[in-house]
Amino acid sequence: MVTMSQQLIGWVGRHILPHERQLRAWLRAAFPAIDVDDVVQEAYCRIATLTHVEHIDDPRRYLFRTARNVVLEQIRRERVVSIEAASGLAELELAPEEQGSPERVVAGRRALERVERLIEGLPDRARQVFRLRKIEGVPQREIAARLGLTETVVENEVARGLRRILDQLTDEERAEMPTRRKPASRTSKAKEQR
Amino acid sequence: MIDDLACQWAARIERGLDDAEQDRLGQWLDADRRHRGALLRAQAALSLLDRGRALAPIEDETPEPEPATDRRWFLKFSASGLAAAIAGGIGLRLWPKGTPISTGIGEIRRLPLDDGSVAVVNSASRLRVAFTRDRRDVELAEGEAWFEVARNHRRPFTVHAGPVRVQAVGTAFDVRRRDGGSEVTVTEGTVKLWSTDSDAEPVFVSAGNRAKVSDIGGVEMASLVPAAPDQTLAWRDGRIVLDDMTLAAAAAEFNRYHAEQLVIDPSLADKQVVGWFRTDDLDGFATAGAAMVGGHVERDRNTIRIVP
């Protein structure tokens, strides 16, 4: 099978992605020497092999644990990480756990609020595309027709905007990139298109 | 770079791929195993941007769905029981009062306790929870449970396993009762361990360590390799992880979860097995176990035998 199930994709969107930002911050603090992108990428690789997720009660913990295992394996292979970094391992068990479910709920909700803000920060055309997609649920093909763009252009806007939102959503450091601000008339265009 | 391409593919998949694109996607995914993870991540982000997600109420934020209605009933029952225990105050400090909890064979139960702690109770276990204003006591009469204890210095959390006492302030640990003693695995923080049948000083066990305590007070410490807590606690996810265990010991692990019992021929008992199994998959384990030791499976009415 080429693509992954909608169920897995939705689950990752709701329950894994919102915690990636914290995961990266934690990895950076605990393992200054490690290539954080590399570990995160590998963690998603492993999650991509899941055939079902119902058995995972605590996705946040699962994500942190998966990343921890990736780090452990790298340390064992003496790849990337020096032996000294292994001292960070003691904190591995403690660091990610924090509080229980309320935190997790808040993280999911915050991620959605952040997505809203990030969409508002996109350049004009991309913002229109995303607003039509998200708020009105218009398919890409129809967005192209409504905005008088080719499908390829819409697709590229989606890909580029997605990339940008993904970065900002999941990484504290990259989130500091300046985002543009726009005066209040921004929604009117999308509505006129109806 | 990978992320750029992954986002591009996520956008294309969204509008629908033609056959040629399907092939190209397949090639891209095969080219590097990381591509699949990157695509999943991109698609997951795009799913957050989908219609209505941000506007609709967030329906599925409860961290764990509660499929079993009997469990709901049980949780209600236990919550009110605990509330009563607290309201009832001092009278309930004495055993055997408190709220009894038991699991059947093969049943694993996750219980949020009143104080914010969580207990996960393994198969065929019996325990009793008695919380008062200034202490939290759990008696483990039989079986095994893992506890994640909500921090509260003024209300010590103590597990009573026969004469063995395991006390935590804010920490996570597992207690398993065995004949003549208990095994304590600490996954987070530190616990204090002692036996009321011994004059020996309490012992402190920190995260990453396991202690075997005999009822009469001898403590034997073992440190865990980093993977081992997961292995010891795999039961919470309904899994058994066998790492170089004898077939007889592995069968004993499985038998905890099943009324139907696995019996190992003595000539095969000491052979080593490895692997991951679901605790409910007795047949799967029997088949795999027999294959690993070069035996085969025979069945009686209530017994599965592995024989040469």
Image (cartoon, coloured by chain):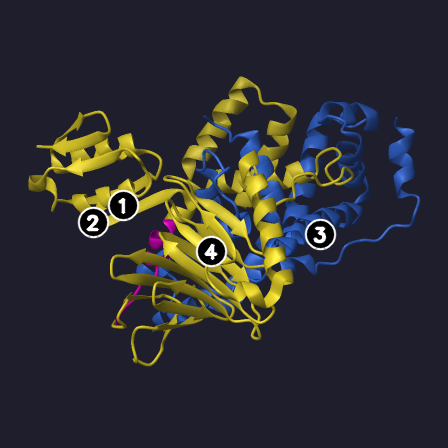
Chain colours: A blue, B yellow
Whole-number angstrom distance, CA of label 2 to CA of label 1: 10 Å
Q: Quadrant of the C terminus of chain B?
A: top left
Above or below A181: residue B48: above
Q: Quadrant of residue B49?
A: top right
Q: Going from the N terminus, do you reach mark 2 or mark 1 first?
A: 2
The kind of residue tagged 2 is: Met
Magenta includes A95? no
Q: Which one is closest to the eye, mark 2 or mark 4? A: 4
The kind of residue tagged 4 is: Arg
Residue named by callout 3? A110
Residue A5 image offset from top left, x and y in percent: 53, 30
Q: Which residues are magenta?
A: B219-234
Along the line of sight, the residue nearer the viewer: B242 or B10:
B242
Q: Residue at x 69, y 49 (%)?
A: A111
The kind of residue tagged 3 is: Arg
Residue A80 image offset from top left, x and y in percent: 39, 62
Asked whether residue B5 is in view, the answer is: no
Q: Which one is closest to the eye, mark 3 or mark 4? A: 4
- Crowding near pointer 2: few (<14 within 10 Å), some, many (20+)? some
- Crowding near pointer 4: few (<14 within 10 Å), some, many (20+)? many
Which label number is shown at residue B253?
1
Q: Chain of mark 2?
A: B
Along the line of sight, the residue nearer the viewer: A95 or A42:
A95
Residue named by callout 2? B245
Question: What is the secondary structure assignment of the residue under circle 3?
Answer: helix
Whole-number angstrom distance, CA of label 3 to CA of label 4: 39 Å
Q: Chain of mark 1?
A: B
Question: What is the secondary structure assignment of the residue under circle 1?
Answer: helix
Work out whether disc 3 and disc 4 sit on a shared chain.
Answer: no
Badge 2 vs badge 1, beta-carbon distance below 8 Å: yes
